[in-house]
Image: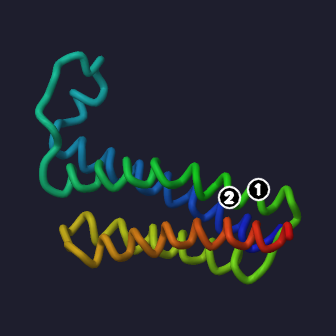
């Protein structure tokens, strides 16, 4: 299995970690009783760390399918080069760093780190294009 596929596994684990962090912070704000119920009532948005962890998770869920698709395309095409490797590392490390930056409200640096992760996806796609030609 390539390093890129292992990094895809790491990204899946990061996704689970974010789900757990978000759920626990939401439960601290809304209570376990609400979480165990049908959740029919409309509540105000989550605030503070719980709100930021919720938004960070949503952000992860927006970019993860693109990363997964890029890694899987490279793997299916048997393309493994420096661009795909660096791209996968940048995405995973960027997403790991992004969570605490967002949770603690660090501005600007968080956006820069988001760009690093997105750059990783573009590097993988560039590696695919380079490997096909």
Residue at the extreme front of the image, as rendered? 133
83 or 49: nearer the viewer = 83
Name the residue: 54% across, 70% down. Answer: 91
- Label 2 and label 1: CA atoms lie apart by 5 Å
Q: Where in the figure is residue 99, as x and y percent of width and height?
A: 35, 65
- Residue 44: give its label: none
On the picture, is 124 further left or further right than 49? Answer: right
Label 2: few (<14), some or many (≥20) within 10 Å?
Answer: many
In this figure, which colouring scheme has been used for the structure? rainbow
**Which residue appears at 15% of the width and 43% of the height?**
29
Query: For the residue labelled by badge 1, is the local secondary structure a helix, a strand or a loop?
Result: helix
**For residue 127, above or below residue 69:** below
* In the image, residue 27 above or below residue 52: above
| Residue 131 x/y as whole percent | 83, 72
User: Split into 4 quadrants, where in the image is the N terminus?
Assistant: bottom right
Circle 1 packing at 10 Å, graded few (<14), some (14-19), many (20+), is some
Q: In x, y percent, where is residue 118?
A: 49, 67
Q: Which mark is residue 70?
A: 2
Q: Which residue is under mark 1?
A: 73
Based on the displayed image, in which of its 4 quarters is residue 125 positioned?
bottom right
Which secondary structure lies at badge 2?
helix
Residue pictured at 54% horizontal, 76% vertical = 90
The answer to whether marks 2 and 1 mark residues whose Cβ atoms lie closer than 8 Å is: yes
Question: In this image, 121 relative to 21: left or right?
Answer: right
Q: Quadrant of the C terminus?
A: bottom right
């Amino acid at each position: 299995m390539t390093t890129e596929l292992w990094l895809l596994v790491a990204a899946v684990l990061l996704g689970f970690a974010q789900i757990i962090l978000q759920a626990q912070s939401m439960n601290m704000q809304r209570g376990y009783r609400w979480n165990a119920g049908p959740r029919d009532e409309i509540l105000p948005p989550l605030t503070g760390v719980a709100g930021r962890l919720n938004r960070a998770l949503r952000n992860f869920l927006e970019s993860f399918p693109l990363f997964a698709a890029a890694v899987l395309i490279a793997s299916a095409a048997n393309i493994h080069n420096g661009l795909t490797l660096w791209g996968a590392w940048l995405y995973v490390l960027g997403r790991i760093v992004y969570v605490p930056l967002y949770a603690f409200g660090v501005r600007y640096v968080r956006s820069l780190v988001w760009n690093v992760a997105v750059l990783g996806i573009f590097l993988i796609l560039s590696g695919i294009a380079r490997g096909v030609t």
